[in-house]
Amino acid sequence: MTPRAKAQKSFGFFILFVESIMKKQTKYIFVVGGVISGVGKGITSSSIGLILKNRGLKLTAIKIDPYINIDAGTMNPTEHGEVFVLKDGDETDQDMGNYERFLDINLTRINYITTGRVYKTVIEKERNLEYKGKCVEVVPHIPLEVIKRIKEAGKNAKADIVIIEIGGTIGEYQNMLFLEAARMMKLSSPKDVVFVMVSYLPTPQKVGEMKTKPTQHAVRTLNASGIQPDILIARGDVNLDKKRKEKISLFCNMPVDRVISAPDVDSIYDIPINFEKEKLSDKLCEILNVVSKKPNVKAWKKWKKFAKYAHNGQKTIKIAMVGKYFETGDFILSDSYLSIIEAIKYSSYAQNKKPILTWLNSSDYEKPAQPNGHSGGNPTKLKELKKYDGIIIPGGFGSRGVEGNLNVVKFARENKIPYLGLCYGMQMMVIEYARNVLGLKDANTKEVNPNSKNLVIDVMESQKEILKNNFYGGSMRLGEYKAILRDNTIAKGAYAQKEIIERHRHRYEVNPAFIGDLEAKGLIFSGRSPDGHLMEIAELPKNRHPFFLGTQFHPEFLARPLSPHPLFTAFIKACCAHLKLNAKEGIKKKK
Ligand code: GLN
């Protein structure tokens, strides 16, 4: 070859190289679940996201919920778990919270897909003649709309990798069209699409041996949809041994090193660390042919340090969560309050404390109604609250448990137990204060008793028309709003800034007509909307109570593992101080 030809050739390679960088191809990782629901697809997706982000890649995540509901907002939390609110107000599945927390990103409604959303769009397009006279059919038009949304989410985020978690379990009717969309994507671009199956390997007690058969069946069922998993995450009580890895490899048609053992762990934050022990990020990069950087050692160290806190060895603080959305049959399911639990953990770990949460049913703090219609409280039960270092009343709807909540708030206020009220919990604070300090005995929220003469919590003006027309879905005050903080308050001290942005989900608000009287009696509204009309934070001054604070918004949605939420941190600090005080008093009593 002449020197000129040589130069031309190497220049050609250079152009190809530059072109390949310029045309950066987005890659897609589909995560599907086998055998049983609740197998940990959400945490697996989040953990995969984290280990890839740690390799210098840009990630976004999508949750597909295969139900007809447009969003999760109209579902009962005991049915569905927590409703996680995004910055743009979308009411979504709790897994979206896991993605935001693990990946430390903010997602928007494009990242949340439901069957209802997809069908609604397709039907609207058909009505608008966008299919140009074609017969619109379930296949291919529904999967094509799904693909469009997935690609849009990737483009919006300028992502190198999009993780798509398909809800439900393999073999259900509900998620078939989503699997079909995934299959079509793989067909059109085989090198850019990976399938991860999260499956469950039971160890029946009587048999005493881990069984691979259900997983084999699940993989075959997935095969019937035209999909072969590239990676299998084998969930089980214990580690998968070599023999079972080989069995799965043989019968599920995949190299043995693509079978990843994922035993139960005490803390979900260990999962990315365990995945990396199995070199999962290397394997994914290899399959997807993406050039990843070396692991970001600093970020990884921080994560490991944080994950360590979840384990024993630190002092504990006892926190009571008083609510109503955790009973399902004979089980207690704390899923409805997932973001709050995580927010508590982050702030506690940062104080080198381990939180012990106790679930208390608000109805247990009610007594049969008195003549005025109010409950007198259950004195023995209430006294038991003294053993906690802090009490939280989370968000809620409707009248069940409200009287119990009010008794709990009164007890916390009078006994100076740190109290954090979140949304409904803040409204409870205001009602309790109005009843017991202002003497407005029938004070209430319109949501519970529209006939009360003292509606200290009233429906927001903007909501009246909505409620009249029964437009319930997606119509609350939702998503991010600004608030301005007042100087010399607990709130301002915690945030250490004047202006904050927090996520909301409510229809009712503090009635402006009562603000003057409430403040005159000592309650401070330390956070307000920029126009001053909406009360966003209520608190008592520190000289009257160590920590008695409620927020109309949901701070829990912004808590992240490595950046705990300032209000939760302030609350936890108050709990620690309460713990110390109790310990001192305990010593005094003994003496
Ligand atoms: N039910 C109350 C309202 O709609 C509080 C809502 C909540 O706690 N998220 O205003």
Image (cartoon, rainbow, N blue to C red):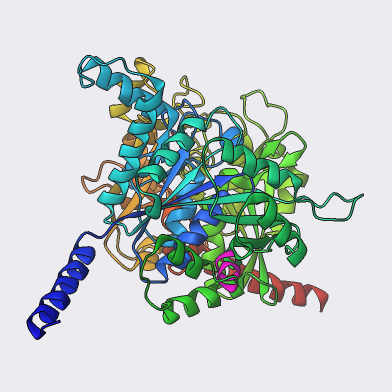
Q: Is residue 344 above or below residue 538?
A: below
Looking at the picture, tell me which residue is in the foreground, 229 or 331. Answer: 229
Q: Quadrant of the N terminus?
A: bottom left
What residue do we see at 75% from left, 76% from top? 588
- Report which quarter residue 490 is drawn in: bottom left
Residue 274 lies within the magenta run: yes
Looking at the picture, tell me which residue is in the foreground, 499 or 75. Answer: 75
Dominant SS type (magenta): helix
Q: Position of residue 237 (x, y in %)?
A: 75, 58
Looking at the picture, tell me which residue is in the foreground, 561 or 550. Answer: 561
Q: Position of residue 30 (x, y in %)?
A: 47, 48
In the picture as drawn, the residue positioned furthest to the right comes out as: 206
Where on the image, by quarter, is ligand 1?
top left
Q: Would you say residue 560 is visible in this rendering?
A: no
Q: Position of residue 182 (x, y in %)?
A: 43, 41
The magenta span reads 271-277
Q: Position of residue 392 (x, y in %)?
A: 57, 51
Q: Left or right? Give the position of 536 relative to 347.
A: left
Q: Quadrant of the C terminus?
A: bottom right
In the picture as drawn, the residue positioned furthest to the bottom comes out as: 3
